[in-house]
Every structure is written in C-alpha cells, then in structure tokens.
C-alpha cells in the first residue's frame, strides 16, 4: 500500500480520486474475505530489523483525530480489545515515507536520525500551501481498518516528493517501490476477531461516509514502540506545515 508521487501529485483530481477509490475497493474486498475466513494478518510488537521503524509521518488536526479515535473505539467493541487501536489519541498518523527498519532504543541523538530530522524540516519548509485531505470512508484490509484519505490538490504529492528529495541517500528503504494510497490506520489486527460478520457489516456501512476534510498540521520523524495496548509514535523531531483552517473547512 504505497503512495505514488505521480498519482497523488497530479492536477487531475478526478483521475486521482478514481485511482484511490479503485485501490481502496480492492483492498476492502480482500479484507472482507480474509476477516470472514479468519485468515487476516495478525501484527506483533516490532523486533529489530522489522516493521514500525523510523518514518516520516504527518499529524492531523484535532477534529480529525477525534473522529479517528471514535471509530477506533467502536471497532474494538466488534473486533475485541486485544487489537491495536492505532486511530486512538496519541497513535493516529499518516505515513509519508518509511525510512529505516525498526531499531530498538533509537532516539534523537542518533546521527542518522538527526540527519533525517534536518531533512524533514527542509521538506516541510519547501511547501507554500497546506496539506489537506478529504476523509472519505473506511476500508477493511487484511491487516486492519483504515480511514481513506484523498488529497484535495497536488500538495500532498509535493510533500512526498520533497521528503524523498531531502533525504537523498538516507531514503533508500522505499526507493524500489511507490505508494498508491494515503490512509490513516484505525485498528491493526493482532489476533482472532470476536465478531467478524458484524465487523464487516460495520465497515461496509461506512465505506462511503463523508467525514469532512483533514488538515496535516506537522511533518514528524517518528519511530514506534508498543505500550502494551497499541503502537505509539515516538517523535524524534517535527516541523510545522502551512496552516489554513479555511482551506481545511475549519473555523
């Protein structure tokens, strides 16, 4: 599930939205089948060299975080409370680019991390317009439930391109592929699902919900840790993004 800079950076928004819709629909069909068959993915706390490593992520505005947290709580009532509510307050984020596999104990004093902080600061500073997404429904993938995000213009793609450019050789991890969607995970599966049929019906009923616009407030360099209930980002550095509450539909 990767974000293509060509796709999200295009000025043809109808074409972009159709591409996102097709990908989310395909993921949802795979998710429905996996959940009902009990063959869904089950995540585990990260080990060295695995997933949940150093990444460039964006934080979202308070209104959107409240929406994601509310969904996460509702989903846990159906799926069970052993799954990770990654849409909860303190966990929600949107990954722009994964940078390095997981390294336990990584902090901001690490020279590589320090270089990456400087890179994301330059990337954020290169933007003249706010990064705004339309929050358009939920999708059920084999790995969990995600909130579907559609950029309102080419600025999100410009941010992804700037992060890649400013990281240079340090951005090697995702050089071999491109992302094709923007999303924020709401729940990661970690074990069996209490009521799979109810979960599928719940997500299907919200597949096309229009939840308004989401403003990316800052670009962050984060690694992740497990707090015994979920994965939470550990912020090693951050830079503010252009802010326009009017553009994001806020007052």
Image (spheres, rainbow, N blue to C red):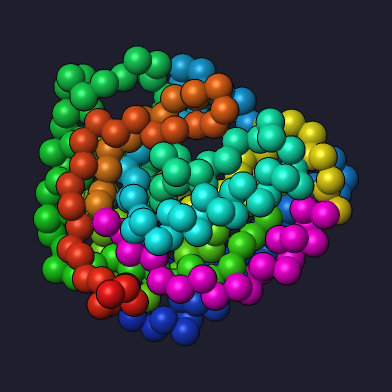
**Quarter of the image where one finds residue 154:** bottom left
Q: Nearer the viewer, residue 217 or 11?
A: 217
Q: Is residue 219 left or right of residue 183?
A: left
Q: Nearer the viewer, residue 27 or 177?
A: 27
Q: Where is residue 52 drawn, in percent x and y?
A: 46, 31
Q: State whether residue 77 appears in this view.
A: yes
Q: Is residue 8 above or below residue 188?
A: below
Q: Is residue 104 above or below residue 215?
A: above
Q: Where is residue 228 drawn, in percent x and y?
A: 55, 22
Indicate yes or no whether the magenta region holds residue 152: no
Q: Nearer the viewer, residue 19 or 176?
A: 19
Q: Where is residue 64 drawn, in percent x and y?
A: 43, 60
Q: Is residue 44 left or right of residue 101?
A: right
Q: Where is residue 109 drawn, in percent x and y?
A: 18, 19
Residue at point 39%, 83% (across, down) = 12
Q: State whether residue 54 appears in this view.
A: no
**Quarter of the image where one finds residue 174:** top left
Which stretch appears magenta? 198-217
Residue at point 26%, 21% (across, down) = 107
Q: Is residue 133 above or below residue 112?
A: below
Q: Is residue 50 left or right of residue 158?
A: right
Residue at point 46%, 55% (across, down) = 66
Q: Is residue 144 above or below residue 104?
A: below
**Quarter of the image where one finds residue 200:** bottom right
Count of residue discs: 0
Residue at point 16%, 32% (across, down) = 115
Q: Quadrant of the C terminus?
A: bottom left
């Amino acid at each position: 599930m990767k974000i293509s800079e060509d796709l999200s950076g295009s000025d043809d928004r109808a074409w972009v939205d159709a591409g996102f819709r097709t990908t989310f629909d395909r993921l949802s069909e795979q998710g429905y089948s996996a959940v009902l068959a009990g063959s869904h993915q089950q995540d585990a706390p990260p080990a060295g060299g695995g997933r949940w490593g150093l990444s460039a992520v964006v934080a979202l505005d308070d209104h959107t975080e409240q929406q994601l947290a509310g969904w996460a709580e509702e989903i846990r009532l159906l799926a069970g409370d052993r799954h990770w509510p990654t849409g909860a307050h303190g966990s929600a984020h949107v990954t722009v680019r994964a940078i390095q596999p997981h390294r336990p104990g990584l902090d901001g004093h690490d020279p590589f991390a320090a270089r990456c902080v400087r890179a994301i600061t330059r990337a954020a500073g290169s933007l003249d317009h706010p990064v705004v997404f339309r929050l358009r429904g939920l999708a059920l993938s084999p790995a969990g439930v995600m909130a579907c995000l559609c950029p309102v213009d080419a600025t999100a793609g410009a941010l992804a391109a700037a992060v890649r450019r400013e990281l240079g050789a340090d951005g090697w991890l995702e050089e071999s592929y491109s992302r094709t969607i923007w999303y924020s995970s709401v729940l990661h599966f970690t074990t069996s699902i209490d009521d799979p049929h109810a979960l599928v019906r719940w997500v299907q009923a919200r597949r096309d919900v229009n939840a308004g616009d989401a403003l990316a407030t800052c670009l962050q360099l984060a690694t992740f840790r497990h707090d015994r209930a979920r994965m939470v980002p550990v912020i090693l550095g951050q830079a503010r993004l252009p802010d326009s509450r009017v553009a994001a539909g806020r007052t």
